[in-house]
Image (cartoon, helix red, strand yellow):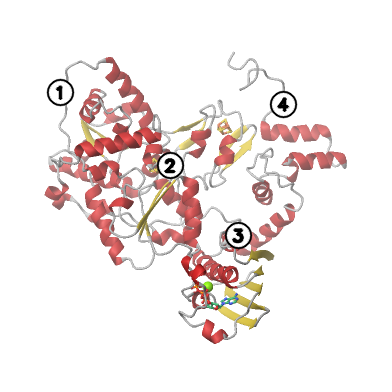
Amino acid sequence: MSKQQIYHALKIDKDICYGCTHCMNVCPTDAIRINDGIARILKKRCIDCGECLKVCPVDAIYVEQDDLDNIFDYEYRVALVPAVFTGQFPTSITEEEVFSMMKELGFTHVFQAEFMVDMLNELIDDQMEMNEDKPLISTFCPSVVRLIQVKFPSLIDNIASVKPPVDASAAFYRKLLQNQGVPDKQIGIFYVTPCAAKIAAVKGIDDEYAAINGVINMMYLYNKLYTKIKNNKDSERELPVLPHLSSKSIQWSITRGEADNMKGRCLAVDEIHNVIEFLERLENDEIPKVDYLELRACDQGCAGGVLLHGNRFLTVDRMKRRAKQLESETGDINWKEHKEIIEDKDLFISKVNPLPAMSLDQDFAEALKKMERIRNLMCYLPGIDCGACGSPSCQALAEDIVQRKANLSNCVFLQRMMEKSKKLSSEHAIRIIERTWGKDRLDKDCKKIGAKNEGM
Amino acid sequence: MEFVYEVEGGNFTKAGNASSAVKKTMKQLNVDPKIVKRTVVALYEAEVNIVAHAYGGVITVNVNAEHIHIVLDDNGPGIPDIDLAMQEGFSTASSKVREMGFGAGMGLPNIKKNVDELKVSSEVDKGTRVEMKTYLKNQ
Ligand SMILES: Nc1ncnc2c1ncn2[C@@H]1O[C@H](COP(=O)(O)OP(=O)(O)OP(=O)(O)O)[C@@H](O)[C@H]1O
Ligand code: SF4
Ligand code: SF4
Ligand SMILES: [Mg+2]
């Protein structure tokens, strides 16, 4: 098997992280360890869901993004904007206002990420009809697709082959511009992303994302635009004419956006832990016949994306209201009129490969040996799952030990036992603690969070 | 390597716990996902049968380099006619069980389809033993 280069968008700022274990405890794939007082992400397991970023008390976790200035590498600078972006602004600010401001930031064109939703919806319905017994799983949320690759490889064949709207819309708009005579090299399409998972998907080698040239952090853009709008609310400006989206398209990225519009029996599950629980059951064949599964890593779908500003429930409410306002209007660019430019490769993904990361060893016999050792180690570990060893649970520490990434003496309780039986000197024990938690970790420090001089 | 799980009769909320644990183990052992799926589907059906039809039981799983061998032993009413029980659509499930979505009489046939070897033995009023084996090496 060729080694696949996997891109991750979540990074830890080593200067800010102080090893508080919050991220390690929420990670749904056990992908975080603490070493030298700093969190570390195990690349093979990370699915870019962003749970760690949400929980970090000091914003030490950030997403790698493109500089806004990168757009100036292109003559035609297209912002591909998902509906959740405008959904964050108060309803008194119109879409046109938001988009005209984006032009002031340097974009020459603004296009909606959900533009192709109606067409994709039809394709998925067709696929469902041909598909007999297994439920199709939506490709919409890249974090869920990665989760299946990493943790549920036996469900790979359930993943639908219809592209997510962002990708299809990007491919469509690129062609539309090309048809107007714009050379491909001059077109830069930048997706305004609500999450890390989409960044990872765009930056990864997955060639279906080739239509997109870069990603812009939605939170960054929101702050930039909102200040701009606030500061010159009354100034006259020319408002762009936009292709209107159907109300369905606007709501596509929020929970039940897909499920409510498919023909068969559809289920929507949101929030990553819920998704994992559901996939476990699906894998056991415990789920009665369902045709389509809309699975999203974030609570409330993309309205709960890590790069969104504000409360997700309010965002959903605003999006629903915007959708209602549009219900009677029909769009002015219709994909049906441009059908000839759309090719299959703009609409269908290439094969998704399993990337199993939960196994103890590639070799079965080796894995079996390691598992026996783990079960033996578990006889000694106290089962408190405190994380003080730098691994998320006793079980995880046992696994790390057999993988030669940790030692039994990393367990703070076993250290005491070893000290008592004189197998470990107290100096050595302190050195072990320092290796996990950093040199001065146990020194008095009144500036730490919650201490009397915090922030001084 | 041996794993043992207890199953409580009548407790549908917990039905599937053993299957999930075995699934996790098999994934850690890097068993082919297709074999994991087949084994887990079969085990789940057998586990639910104990919950639905018996009073309680014990599941013993043995894994080695060649195969995974699972034995489900229960205390329960037993199966008077095993050949009949193995037929698709045969079920003695109560209406209560059917309401919960079980009782189509597809469990045992489904187990047979998903494992390489299946042996069912039973003594009426005492209990049932379901033994299944699946080879891990690709034949
Ligand atoms: N462990 C058991 N103890 C007692 N009777 C059993 C046991 N397992 C199966 N049976 C009997 O065999 C019948 C057929 O089992 P099978 O699993 O095929 O169908 P079911 O459990 O009734 O329905 P389904 O599995 O489709 O929900 C059962 O209805 C029951 O009478
Ligand atoms: S949650 Fe704590 S351990 Fe994780 S990155 Fe933030 S500061 Fe570091
Ligand atoms: S639900 Fe939406 S915002 Fe959240 S990870 Fe998936 S695609 Fe990104
Ligand atoms: Mg049954």
Q: Distance between the residues labelled 1 and 2?
A: 37 Å
Which dot, 4 or 1, sits closer to the camera? 1
Eyeballing the image, is A395 above or below A53? below
In the image, are marks 2 and 3 on the same chain? no
Residue type at mark 2: give it: Asp
Q: How far apart are marks 2 and 4 (CA)?
A: 37 Å
Q: What element carries label 4?
A: loop
Q: Sequence order check: which comes first, mark 2 or mark 4? A: 2
Q: Quadrant of the C terminus of chain A?
A: top right
In the image, are marks 3 and 1 on the same chain? no
- Judged left or right of residue A428, residue A265 is left
* In the foreground, B41 or A24: B41
In the image, are marks 4 and 1 on the same chain? yes
Q: Mark 1 points at which residue?
A: A238
Eyeballing the image, is B79 above or below A376? below
Question: Which quadrant of the structure image shows residue A331?
Answer: top left
Which dot, 2 or 4, sits closer to the camera? 2
Which dot, 1 or 2, sits closer to the camera? 2
Q: Distance between the residues labelled 2 and 3?
A: 27 Å
Q: x, y (%) of residue B116?
A: 55, 77
Residue type at mark 1: give it: Glu
Q: x, y (%) of residue B33?
A: 50, 63
Q: Name the residue under label 2.
A: A299
Q: Which mark is residue A442?
A: 4
